[in-house]
Amino acid sequence: MPSFPSAARTALIERLKQNGIHDTHVLDAVLETPRELFLIPRLHLQAYDDVALPIGRGQTISQPTVVALMTQALEINDRHKVLEIGTGSGYQASILARLCRRLYTIERHKPLLIEAEEKFKSQRLHNITAIVGDGFAGWPIQAPFDRIMVTAAAPKVPQALLDQLAIGGILVMPVGGVGVTQELRRVTRLADDLYSSVNLCGVRFVPMVPDVAADYDMDQDHTILSHKAEALA
Ligand code: SAH
């Protein structure tokens, strides 16, 4: 892995502070996560710029300020079981995993998930379970989750995810249409049938797309079954 001047990393942390990130656990997790690891070599010089960058298959690694804002809004601690929808490059997942007890993450593009899993291994993050699947369905056998983060936008929060949120739990996701600014929504489950919700800021995310991506044949896949067996064990 190329080494980057620590100045670039610390400059990013200063920028995050200016942008309202005050949670020192979140700032430390961003500082410890080598963003260049998730980018193709051509983009390495931009690794610590506060911008979204392409990761292939039309998907993007989010802007660090947005990653940090969403993470801070979840108020994660090391007892939490967290679900992420949209593993993508694995950058956001790597930050979440540094803060929580166990992270479950779902991605609809198998090739992206395989690459992300390599990145988890190389950082020695062993508290992540990742599967190829449709995030609209969540991960019922692992529910309830103390925290849920969705890193792709949808017109409304999927019902399955609301159902899988623990009472007292928090969900953060961009809500809105495609190609427009969406609202970053923070939902808290107050009781069985009672949720409160606030909009934090405007964001731009790629859309949540239903079903597993066509570059992937679920019937031929054995990893998804072994992950399920592991989860049941
Ligand atoms: N969190 C990622 C960035 C997410 S980009 C990172 O840190 O790099 C959004 C991701 O959501 C993409 O990888 C996209 O393939 C995935 N996605 C979109 N719809 C999905 C769905 N229904 N289920 C699971 N993943 C989905």
Image: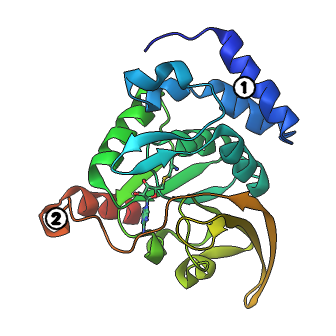
Q: Which residue is mark 1?
A: 12
Above or below 4: residue 125: below
Q: Position of residue 121 (x, y in %)?
A: 40, 32
Q: Position of residue 187 (x, y in %)?
A: 75, 72
Q: Quadrant of residue 9 in the image?
A: top right
SS for dot 1: helix
3D distance between C-alphas at marks 1 and 2:
40 Å
Neighbor class of circle 2 (other Cα within 10 Å; few <14, some 14-19, many 20+) is few
User: Which is more toward the observer, 114 or 20?
Assistant: 20
Q: In this rendering, would 230 be left or right of 87? A: left
Type of amino acid under label 1? Leu
Asked whether residue 123 appears in the rendered view, the answer is: yes
Residue at the left extreme?
Answer: 220
Q: In this rendering, would 177 be left or right of 167? A: left
Q: Position of residue 225 (x, y in %)?
A: 25, 64
Q: Position of residue 76 (x, y in %)?
A: 73, 51
Q: Earlier in the sequence, mark 1 or mark 2?
A: 1
Q: Quadrant of ligand 1?
A: bottom left
The C terminus - image quarter = bottom left
x 35%, y 66%: residue: 133
Type of amino acid under label 2? Asp
Above or below 16: residue 11: above
Above or below 13: residue 120: below
Q: Which residue is mark 2?
A: 217
SS for dot 2: loop
Q: Quadrant of residue 180 in the image?
A: bottom right
> Which disc, if any, is residue 221?
none
The N terminus - image quarter = top left
